[in-house]
Image: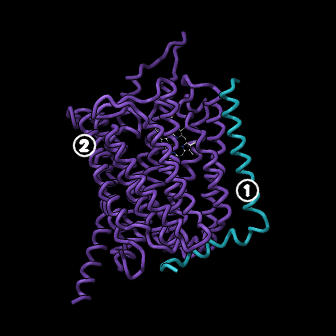
Chain colours: A purple, B cyan
Amino acid sequence: MNQQEGYADDIVKGFVIWSMVWGLVAVLVGVFISFQIAFPQLNFPPYLTYGRLRPIHTNAGIFGWGIGSFMAFFIYITQRLTRTSLWSPGLAKAQLWLFNIVIALAAVTLAMGMNRSKEYAELEWPVASLVVVLWVIFAVNIVMTIVKRREEQMYISLWYILATLVGVAVLYLVNNAAIPVSLTKSYSAYAGANDANVQWWYGHNAVAMVLTTPPLAIFYYFLPKATGVPIYSHRMGVIAFWSLIFMYLWTGAHHLLWAPVPDWVQTLAMGFSVMLIAPSWAAVFNGYFSMNGQWHQMRENYLVKFLIFGITFYGLQTLQGPSQSIRTFSAFIHFTDWVPGHVHMGTLGWVSLVLFAAIYYTIPRLYHSEIYSIGLANVHFWLVLTGQLIFSITMWIAGVQQAAMLNATNPDGSLHYSFIETMVELYPYWHMRAVGGVIYLAGLLVFLYNIYQTIAGAKTQAVAQRA
Amino acid sequence: MDSASIYYLGVTLILFLIFVVIVVRTYSKKHAVRGEEPKFRMMDDDYPN
Ligand code: HEM
């Protein structure tokens, strides 16, 4: 525990560092699989094939980089907003070990081809059971810290944190219900269309409870900290929170439009998805209005740049998402490369930009030093922004072209192009995406170097002071 | 519509009503000042207490 400040911060350092390690793994594998798509001869069976590496990429990204840093910042933020030290630093230490063991096991089992075939819920039951233990340890520690808080009212970030803890627990347990037949194989407890429905109820709420509520908690905490000015409206934040929670749960079936699930379930999902624009944009406006009179900080304060671009991508994401949820639009872009364009604006743009800002803000404070180079932070910003935009925009164009080809018909009504013909046309876009990925990776390396130098500098300084 | 869908929509309606209560309470005059307090208090949370 950091005795001087009374908060258990050493554990935050551990989670931040390990999440960066897994983030690097995710991006390296991501870049590699983007090359495998562009150059199929780069597939080396059985382990280094696209099919094995793709889930390693998503698991390392969402669970290693995403959840790892959310754990760090939930611990950091909760202590401060409750003005209470962590309920059990010992438990948090065990959590860090278990977290790394789980992610490593996930990578190994997925590489060996053990996979439940459910997207974002690929891990077989022994590893999934460890995830449950991990989450319980984490949730108990955070909830108990909130219970013994010294601050009566809860700032909006704490609401988002609580929602994440409860939401992920419910989703994970329900969608992972399975009947094991051996140590490495299990079958889903649901069948057919029901299974698909449960899977996408889980899938889209993973977007809600992993890729939306935690970064919102972090955004609402670090934006005012970075600008030095409170957020525009706390009450608007609270209303947006409750409406987001109310609406998200019904939207999963927008992944199953035109699929054999009841029509009214699809319509309900479509309606709620469009309604989601309101709470999502309430958060975006809260961010923008908080900048009233502070917009000059976009030039002067690199943290603000990351945060405001991050929330802007969230805003774009939550306009694009509801459009994709409309039946006619979905019929056009579903099964095309449009979707990875959407996904990566969310993960690389929204989630990662906010996490970069939070790491830049906290690391110098945790190590009692200054950031090594603001210049490098700016280089990092422009590289990741450029890489992500190249990626997303290329995929949207590719998606529209592919959709148009898939929909083209001959005068007799038969399809003009076969599926494989649409794929052949996509090669130039896939090359471009790989270039975008390399630029993003370069930005990430600059970031990691900057953080490494900040920590190394702080340690040298501490030794010099002691001498 | 079968009973399952009516049940599904009924739950939706109940949640919606709870949501309306939250909105009315949050924006009531009584909670106007108190509802904004946390955003000021969080600005200075570097130390416990
Ligand atoms: C109002 C909010 C949103 C709505 C209504 C929405 C809607 C959708 C829809 C309809 C799809 C499926 C597209 C298809 O396959 O045809 C999708 C995919 C996806 N979205 Fe969003 N989206 C929203 C926000 C976000 C955000 C903020 C993220 C954050 C990263 C995100 C991440 C994803 C991911 C990862 C997938 C891919 C799922 C897959 O693997 O198939 N979305 N979204």
Identified at 54% across, 12% down, the residue is A413
Mark 2 residue's CB less than 8 Å from ligand 1: no
Give percent across and percent down for residue A13.
34, 68
Circle 2 SS class: helix
Give percent across and percent down for residue A163.
54, 54
Residue denoted by label 2: A108
Front residue of A381/A371: it is A371
Give residue B23's mark.
1
Give residue A27's mark.
none
Q: Can you say whether B40 is above or below A424 in the image?
A: below
Any part of residue A397 in sight: no
Name the quadrant containing residue A227. Answer: bottom right
Mark 1 chain: B
Q: Is residue A141 left or right of residue B5?
A: left
Q: Quadrant of the N terminus of chain A?
A: bottom left
Give percent across and percent down for residue A457.
27, 77
**Label 2 sits on what residue type?**
Val
Name the quadrant containing residue B12. Answer: top right
Mark 2 chain: A
Q: Can you say whether A237 is above or below A259 in the image?
A: below
Q: Can you say whether A75 is above or below A47 in the image?
A: below
Q: Quadrant of the C terminus of chain A?
A: bottom left
Front residue of A114/A57: it is A114
Q: Is residue A453 left or right of residue A84?
A: left
Circle 1 SS class: helix
Give percent across and percent down for residue A242.
64, 53
Q: Residue furthest top?
A: A412
**Label 1 sits on what residue type?**
Val
Q: Residues within 10 Å of mark 2 (few under 14, many from 20)?
A: few
Front residue of A189/A16: it is A189
